[in-house]
Image (cartoon, helix red, strand yellow):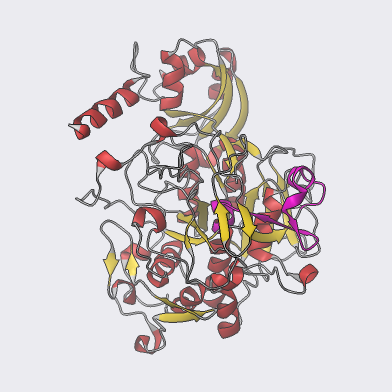
Amino acid sequence: MKRIVFLMSFCLLFAGGLFGKDHAKLDRHIREKSAKGKQNEKITVIIQRTSPAGVADLDDIKTKGGKVKRHIARMKTIVAEMTVAQVEKISDNPMVKHISMDEPIKGHSGESNVVSGAVLATQTYGVTGANIGVAIVDSGIAPHPDLVVVKSVDFVDPTRNGGYDAYGHGTHVAGIVAGSGASSGGAHKGVAPGVKLVDLRALGANGGGYSSDVIAAIDWAITNKNANDNNGQPLNIRVINLSLGHQPYESTADDPLATICRLAVQNGIVVVVSAGNYGKDVNGHTVYGSITSPGNEPMVITVGAMSTFGTDSRFDDAVATYSSRGPTMVEHRMKPDLAAPGSHVAATLAAGSFLAVSHPELQVDGPYMMLSGTSMAAPVVAGTVALMLQQNPGMTPNTVKAALMYTAEKRNVSAFSVGAGYLNAAGAVNMAANINPAAAVGQYWLRNMGFDLNYSNVIAGSPAVWGKTIVWGKGYTGNALFYNAHAWGQTIVWGDTIVWDETIVWDETIVWEDTIIFGETLVWDETIVWDETIVWDETIVWDEAFF
């Protein structure tokens, strides 16, 4: 009976915006506004077309009273401001494929380089991410002694030339990826201090922005991945970090933010995304189905957060209560893909930023600050990917994703919490070192017959046994990654074969609308009481700030 009631309410929820005309091309958010009679409300939308937009198409929007804000040719997409009624009229154009709201975007916020196994990877293989470009799409990267930025582009304020982070989130994320640790004697070093940091500012002074800004930044990264940096050297952008997201209102096939991420992967760039901080409701109950967009996109690497409880040991690590869990809201796919350290991560501080000024208690060891969230877990993985690609530049994004999953430490918790398991950076680099990407499809591609694979690593005294599971459909295990398969190519859409099985109990699954007021129930930080025991209070809510 509960199942029937849930399904009825689920259907009613998605039918809510369909009264009157059937605007199948509009996302659910726009349909909801239409159903509530908000025809004259001005909104900004992302219009995806079946063919490239010409001058006449742009003029048509202006003629109907709209304002064209941006044109993204790669996606055959126009970003425009207009009323809900005008959007409905535009949707009648047979050349319009789909229209989405330009959703507000905000960031999702031990020594992560140690507990993740990155330090062990560097010690074993000498990798630092050297010559691998990592694009940080965030609130900007402020000047800091630990950070070297080789290129900056501002999509919020084009008059700026970089070196600006009024909020402080992007600088912290950049430090987790590539901080040198110079200001702390190496104590707060990033995962891959040798990478080329590319600063693509898409979030404003309040830590927020819009999907269209993020899309424009990713589009720039695709176009300029092999352009020269400030020193005349190739950027070699191989990784994009997105510590941000918004509530999904449509399938990933229609979601423009998911679409541009998919295009980035198909162009050879690994896209790492935070899962979101919606793992519990205001009453502290665990919430499922709360993965944000674009973390719901199958081809990106979606990262949940682990609490390290202030130690380098992995023995006591556990899934952070705030970390968003799967399945994805619309398609019911398995996410996240894996989890990484995300709680109380010390990294570079943007002096004078909102976070630094408003919350001085977050500052630690001088020019560093401590934040928690899946925003902090994602760059740990992004840095690990850079280490893998330095070790083996021939790996495709799908191969990288498979290797991360295969070597992750399996945890005795739901895959909807940690995906394939807990990041093992040392194992991932070991796997990368043993793959021969030149092998023909269908051929065994492990070097030295695979005898050099570790299958386990000892990280800061804790054993991390490889889970040897790739979560795709019902999961690949055993020797799936020992052969070069079509699945590891760039054109294969990860997750197309996902099917429901009997392990999903809908009656016990909580969904977005019933429990979460999006943007108002986010975990901000955790309070530590250092006494004979450590009390980790993970129930703090901070207005509309995303970490």
The percent coordinates of residue 524 (x first, y second) are 60, 45
Q: Decide if residue 36 is on the left or right side of residue 134.
A: left
Question: In terms of image quadrants, where is residue 515?
Answer: top left
The percent coordinates of residue 519 (x first, y second) are 55, 34
Instruction: From the viewer's side, name the closer residue of 411 and 141.
Output: 411
Does the rendering let one see residue 77? yes
Residue range in magenta is: 350-377
Q: Decide if residue 190 is on the left or right side of residue 96.
A: right
Look at the image and say whether residue 152 sits in the magenta stretch.
no
The quarter in which the N terminus is drawn is top left
What's the residue at 40%, 18% (across, down)?
92
Q: Decide if residue 500 is on the left or right side of residue 522.
A: left
Which residue of the protein is positioned furthest toward the left in this rendering? Answer: 1
Does the rendering let one see residue 433? no
What's the residue at 58%, 59% (across, down)?
379
Instruction: From the viewer's side, name the closer residue of 440 and 54.
Output: 440
What's the residue at 54%, 70% (across, down)?
116
Rendered position, 88 above or below 388: above
The percent coordinates of residue 38 (x first, y second) are 50, 12
Rendered position, 355 above or below 133: above
Question: In terms of image quadrants, where is residue 463?
Answer: bottom left
What's the residue at 58%, 69% (across, down)?
311
Rendered position, 469 above or below 156: below
Instruction: From the viewer's side, name the closer residue of 537 and 279.
Output: 537
The percent coordinates of residue 41 (x first, y second) are 55, 14
The tally of labels here is 0
